[in-house]
Amino acid sequence: MPFKRVPQKFNASIKEVVIGTGDKAVTLGGENVLPFYSFDAPIKNPPKVGVEVSDRGPNRDIPGIAAFYGEAKSIVDVAKRACQMPGASFVSLVLDSADPNGENKSVEDCVALCKEVAEAVTLPLVVQGSKNVERDGQLLAKVAEALEGKNVLLMSAKEDNHKQIAVAAVQAYGQKIVAESAVDLNLAKQLNVLISQLGIKNESYAMNVGAAAAGYGFEYVASTLDRIKAAALAQNDATLQLPIITPVGEQAWSVGEAIKSEQDAPAGWGPQEQRGIDMEITTAVAVLAAGSNAVILRHPVSVATVSKLIADLI
């Protein structure tokens, strides 16, 4: 008996979130099929790949990263160079130095940097905070005000600071935000409900449901992504019908495979830089296959490779 394929169709779809302005604007989400199931229905907006730029500068200890950024000295120059990375759809500026337990850079200085970067880049801008909940609530509200009209995406609004960020970013200044939870479908749904109760519409925010490098508790990330996508499409759960963005670079480049020198690593592990690239690509591809609509990466080889894979699979 010949095989007859029956397309899997859903009456639900993921909402679209647009970041940036003009010809370079990027749309996340919009699909009504499972990840890469383009044989069931066209995927309107393929997954996107962003480039991570820390306000501390790129890791020039990695030869490929150092070579790509070359003579770029200031963070503004680095961000401009990141826009030229093959396969990049957006730039993600990380305000690492704002952490009060670290460099404790002032809110004013961070906002000034964001304004300079926003004026210089040619791709849509994503701004990540310092991971300090209290500081990020203050910081991202000010960034939203300073970048009014740029339609930036601000990461991340957590349960403890979502009101402060959402009201300032979305309602006051028309920006987009990301709801961040810790690898749990119920926590993600709960935060989305809290944000929606503030009057924030679905087209104004995306989700970051957590990340981990492949092999480091990644099964929890994959299963969470899979369950969220299934609930959104198959069960028509409107609270989860949001695009997902996953910062992969930080996770991939912080595990042993990426940081152990060739002298310290076990025999057979191979070149350190290649290990980091492999970890970054493997993790990015896995989260995309599980349902993420965008990933944020560091290495130019990773960005080019993952972007090409997306194009080949759509």
Image (tube, helix red, strand yellow):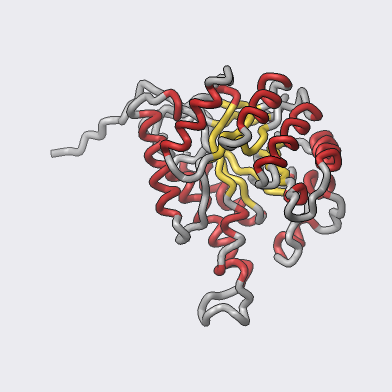
For the point 44% across and 42% down, the residue is 184
For the point 59% across and 29% down, the residue is 27
Marks counted in the figure total: 0
Estimate the x, y position of residue 151 in percent, counting from the top left: 71, 26
**For the view shown, which residue lies furthest in the top direction?**
199
Residue 64 lies left or right of residue 220; in this view the side is right
Estimate the x, y position of residue 273 in percent, counting from the top left: 63, 67
For the point 43% across and 25% down, the residue is 13
Is residue 157 depicted above or below 100 in this figure? above
Is residue 247 depicted above or below 180 in this figure? below
Is residue 112 depicted above or below 255 in this figure? above
For the point 31% across and 30% down, the residue is 8
Regarding residue 146, the answer to whether it shows in the image is yes
Is residue 66 depicted above or below 294 in this figure? below
Regarding residue 51, the answer to whether it shows in the image is no
Front in this rendered view, residue 244 or 130: 130
Front in this rendered view, residue 115 or 67: 115
Estimate the x, y position of residue 238 in percent, counting from the top left: 43, 23
Residue 206 lies left or right of residue 229; in this view the side is right
Estimate the x, y position of residue 108 in percent, counting from the top left: 85, 38
Q: Quadrant of residue 89?
A: top right
